[in-house]
Image (spheres, rainbow, N blue to C red):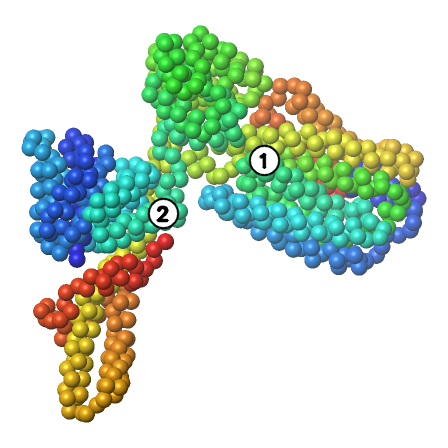
Amino acid sequence: MGAKDRFVPPFGGGTCVRANGPRATSPVSEDDHHLIPFLQTAAAIYLAAGVGALLGVALPAPRIVRGAVWGLAAGAVIHGLAFSTLHRMDPVPPLTSLPMAISFTAWFAVISLLLFMWRARLGGLAAVVGPVAFLAVFLASLGSQSAPADTLVAEGSVPHAHVLLSSAGLGLLGVSGLAGIFYLFEHRRLKQKRGVARGFGLPSLEALDRVNVAALAVGFPLLTLGLLTGSAWLHAVEESFWSGSGHASWMLVAWGIYAGLASARFVGRQGSHQAAASAVAGFAFLLFAVVGVEVLS
Amino acid sequence: MKILLMGTSHHSAPVEVRERFAVADEQAALRKLIDHDEIEEAVLISTCNRVEVVVTTRQPDAARHTLERFFRHELAGEAPLPVKAHLDDVFFVYRDQEATSHVFRVASSMDSMVVGEPQILGQMKDAYGIAMEIGSCGPILSRLFQRAFATAKRVKNETRIAHRPVSVARVAVDLARQIFEDLADKSALMIGAGEMIELALFALQREGLGTGRIANRTRAHAEALAARFGATPHGLDELDDLLQESDIVLACIGGDGPILSANQLRAALRKRRNRPIFLIDIGVPRNIDPAAEALDNAYLYDIDDLQAVVSANEEERRRESLHGERIVLEEQERFAGWMVALQAVPTIRHLRARAESVRQGELERMISRLDLDEEQRQAVEALTRALVNKILHPPLARLGAQTDREEGLAILEEARALFGLDDPEAPGAEIDEALFAEWSDGGAGDDEE
């Protein structure tokens, strides 16, 4: 690579060569000024919704939980406005900055969860999703939202497709992991017969398992497509589909783990409890491969 | 006017005593009561747990004797009461605020055998309806019962008194809802055909259970129960096949040992592709091998587990009833304020009559001295009337608007002393029926919903 700068597509397409000189120096670009108010407002609403849902679950008070779900939806709308602002820019940046990709992941996870909530009593999940979305969006609002100059390397829709597909996959698998955590908690509570009288207003085991299955069924193919487009992006820059970097290797292992989980769930006889534990472990590994390896390197 | 309540309930008398006072024809009983001069209004509440009469009266002592005779002779009849059941012990008598508070507590289900059970409110509404129908319920009891219903609504909405179930069958259904999202696509296997099975199946079907299966040693019993609930009957020899298709298994059948072994359940879970199964064992001795508790994706609850949940829920209801007591107290004070305002009616009437009498006297004396034509006479008449009205308006408004009982009574006493209204023979001392009706319809401190 010589003196050339290196950067990594956020979801493991490999290591690319930056061809057009040094990165933009200012951490906050002109574009960021349009986005940050939306992101900070969305973050505040997500946090309020999370606290409300937590209160509603602890009391338990279904009305407060329902209010928190509406709050989550309001946060998602404002969060979506941030992306629509981004979309009106010319050229449209492909969200290749890690903060913005994580922000998109959180948005997609919230939207997915709201869709699941429409069909089942899952309001209690807002108690965790709200604060997690808040953290993701708040941290994103602190970093630069603009696409780094690197994105000019690969023109066309490949960078967009890579980030959108990978973020969506990560978001859904995150929802699957979250449902798994709740499932394990509920399973333990029901097995040990502790606090069953109060109920805590948490989702039923069946609802959590359905979320787990649906999120895995959609999230895994999206992640696969995200990795393939990342590879295509790398090929457009380096004429190679495989970079051999640690990040790419970890992502490949994560993908393999999810392939195993999906086959155990859809082909084998894996029960709901084991599937929930697998979803939690799988997502922890994926998170490490996406963020942990990046941070450590 | 005084409110008097007399009755017996599960708190004061066992069922063999209560059943003696059960009322077959409420309308006839009420008609007999209001035939007595000392009883102005009456409402009779008769349920399996209580028989109570609420009346309004101007002669509380006489009314109490009438009520005692009513219970002793009209309701209990001539046959002797069971041993140990002395009337003084089995009856309670409440007056005024105590009576109001009791009616509010009963309507809110805080005095019920199962705290928070909703049936009592419907029974009180029926009792009130009967009293209204035969005209034994006047403005005061009408107001009292309307406020009681509003209090019950507040207690239900503002506390969690009826939130958690307190029967084993309902608790089982509640737990099933924590495992399964929707019971409509679920199948329940009931092992046994006794009363508990019947109650549980009823509760599950009320929650929308999809399919019910009943397995019993005596197939005829299973068939009889299955026919009533639209379920399918089976013999115990079919259990292995039934288990793999059942999401909920409820067992309550006689026998020396477990009907279902852990191995049977393990095999069933494998055939079910490890989909969760909810096992409820309310048999004694237990019908399901306790080792099944260790199976993954199987959730086993025995009668002790369910009873522990019932106890916890009962405890929560008791805790919540303390919040309910606060609401009852608030509502009782509001009602007492309304009663004080009602008591102000004769004083107001009296004061008006006194002022009018003074005005008329002074006017006639003045007119006889002055040579006034008709127009001038009318002008002076209007002037004096306006003066009296303006002077009386603040004290009358204050008397009418008073809702705090203690303060209200003190103000009433002061008003009578200040204006010299303590003479019962004075003009206006009798209640003006039109004014009474106006106040009773909610003129004072009205807060009807």
Say which residue label 2 marks.
B153
Q: Is residue B406 visible?
A: no
In-front residue for pair B335/A294: B335
Residue A91 placed where, x, y %? 85, 51
In-front residue for pair B297/B51: B51
Point 18% across, 84% down: residue? B363
**Taking B349 as reference, is B109 left or right?**
right
- The residues tagged by marks 2 and 1 sit, at their Cα atoms, a distance apart of 31 Å
Point 62% across, 50% down: residue? A74
- Tag count in the figure? 2
Q: Is residue A154 above or below residue B212?
A: below
Q: Is residue B228 visible?
A: yes
Disc assigned to residue A119: 1
Q: Give the secondary structure at mark 2.
A: helix
Q: Give the secondary structure at mark 1.
A: helix
Q: Confirm whether circles 2 and 1 share one chain.
A: no
Q: Residue furthest front?
A: B374
Q: Quadrant of the N terminus of chain A?
A: top right
In-front residue for pair B185/B290: B185
Q: Residue furthest top?
A: B237
- Determine whether label 2 and label 1 are within 8 Å by CB: no
Residue A177 placed where, x, y %? 63, 34
Q: Quadrant of residue B236?
A: top left
In-front residue for pair A267/B398: B398
Q: Is residue B232 above or below residue A79?
A: above
Q: Amino acid at mark 1?
A: Arg
Query: Disc 2 is attached to a residue of which chain?
Result: B
Q: Quadrant of residue A253?
A: top right
**Taking B156 as reference, is A133 left or right?**
right
Q: Amino acid at mark 2?
A: Lys
